Image (cartoon, grey):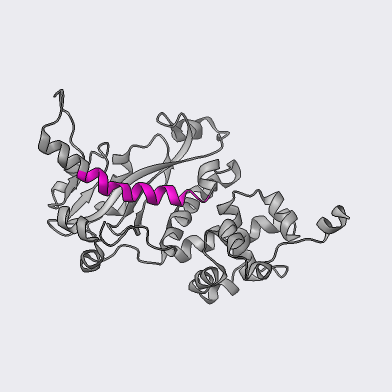
């Protein structure tokens, strides 16, 4: 009887319309309405993809893709759950579509919006802050090519990784996601290659400030634009910090926690924790982008008085 039931069981989004817990478990969205809101944000292009799967409705194709990201499901398992072939799963997975659709969103807020939404205590202590930056690393399956292994090896994580620079606003919205590079890349190298330093983007104004971790040593890169990089103080040969430096560092740490929480929550998409399989490494940068961009579709995690 159990074998019979499994044989005819297949997943379909409509079965979970009133099951908020399951929707959240498989997709990260709060409930069915939240999921559908995101689906409609993708626009009519969801029905006009180059590869059209007649076996699955577009809503179920998105459901399957999010299951892949949220629960790190293998293509074989998804094929069994949705009663389609493994090759169909591989072609249906919407990584490229989601990447290009989400890339169209302008997630970098204007200075006015940043000021309007800045939490009260943040505005009082660091009013000129435009973005809080931090790097994160995502494990990947060991590449077969020796050179790829070398480029992606992280001395910090002691494994092969992809490294990405993430930025959030003082309010906790993800406002910057760099391309992903091999784990051997430094924070400085990633920022040098990013749009943050592109003069045509005009992302910063004179007098703006960036908040970052102690290891992000890029003050000289932004100094010519009169943009400060606010980081905790180095000891510089001293046995201990001065009292005013200790107070400053604690204040910075209390605000930098926002980006650490964002990174932690985004890694609720288990593909970022369990590791990107070798077959998906070429899509690794796009997978990382999607998982962090989806963070902006959840409720704000920073209190208005923080």
Q: Is residue 66 visible?
A: no
Q: Relative to 235, is 52 on the left or the right? A: right
Measured as percent of width and height from the top left, residue 111 is found at 21, 65
Which residue is found at the position 86% from the left and 53% from the top? 3
Q: Which residues are magenta?
A: 251-269
Q: Is residue 132 visible?
A: yes
Main SS type for the magenta part? helix
Q: Relative to 195, is 51 on the left or the right? A: right
Measured as percent of width and height from the top left, residue 185 is found at 37, 37
Measured as percent of width and height from the top left, residue 15 is found at 69, 68
Determine whether 146 is above or below 262 in the image. Answer: above
Magenta-drawn stretch contains 253: yes
Measured as percent of width and height from the top left, residue 108 is found at 31, 62
Q: Nearer the viewer, residue 57 or 33?
A: 33
Determine whether 103 is above or below 269 in the image. Answer: below
Q: Relative to 8, is 200 on the left or the right? A: left
Magenta-drawn stretch contains 202: no
Question: In the rendered view of the protein, which quadrant contains the C terminus?
Answer: bottom left
Q: Nearer the viewer, residue 128 or 105?
A: 128
**Count of picture labels:** 0
Q: Nearer the viewer, residue 286 or 24?
A: 24
Which residue is found at the position 30% from the left and 48% from the top? 133
Question: In the rendered view of the protein, which quadrant contains the N terminus?
Answer: bottom right
Determine whether 59 is above or below 90 in the image. Answer: below
Q: Relative to 128, is 186 on the left or the right? A: right
């Amino acid at each position: 009887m159990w074998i019979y039931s499994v044989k005819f069981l297949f997943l379909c989004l409509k079965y979970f319309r009133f099951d908020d817990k399951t929707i959240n478990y498989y997709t990260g969205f709060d409930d069915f309405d939240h999921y559908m809101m995101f689906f409609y944000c993708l626009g009519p292009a969801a029905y006009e993809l180059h590869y059209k799967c007649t076996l699955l409705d577009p809503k179920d194709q998105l459901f399957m893709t999010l299951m892949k990201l949220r629960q790190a499901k293998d293509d074989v398992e998804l094929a069994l759950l949705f009663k389609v072939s493994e090759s169909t799963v591989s072609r249906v997975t919407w990584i490229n579509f989601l990447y290009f659709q989400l890339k169209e969103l302008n997630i970098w807020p204007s200075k006015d919006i940043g000021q309007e939404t800045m939490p009260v205590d943040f505005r009082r202590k660091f009013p000129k802050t435009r973005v809080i930056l931090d790097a994160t690393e995502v494990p990947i399956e060991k590449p077969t090519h020796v050179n790829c292994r070398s480029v992606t090896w992280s001395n910090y994580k002691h494994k092969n990784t992809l490294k990405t620079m993430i930025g959030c606003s003082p309010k906790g919205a993800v406002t910057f996601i760099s391309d992903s590079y091999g784990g051997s890349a430094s924070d400085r190298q990633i920022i040098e290659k990013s749009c943050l330093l592109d003069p045509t983007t005009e992302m910063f104004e004179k007098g703006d400030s960036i908040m970052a971790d102690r290891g992000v040593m890029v003050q000289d890169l932004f100094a010519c634009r009169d943009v400060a990089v606010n980081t905790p103080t180095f000891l510089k040969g001293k046995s201990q910090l001065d009292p005013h430096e200790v107070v400053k560092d604690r204040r910075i740490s209390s605000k930098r926690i926002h980006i650490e929480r964002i990174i932690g929550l985004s890694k609720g998409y288990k593909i970022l924790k369990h590791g990107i399989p070798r077959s998906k490494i070429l899509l690794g940068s796009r997978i990382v982008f999607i998982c962090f961009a989806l963070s902006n579709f959840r409720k704000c995690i920073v209190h208005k008085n923080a």
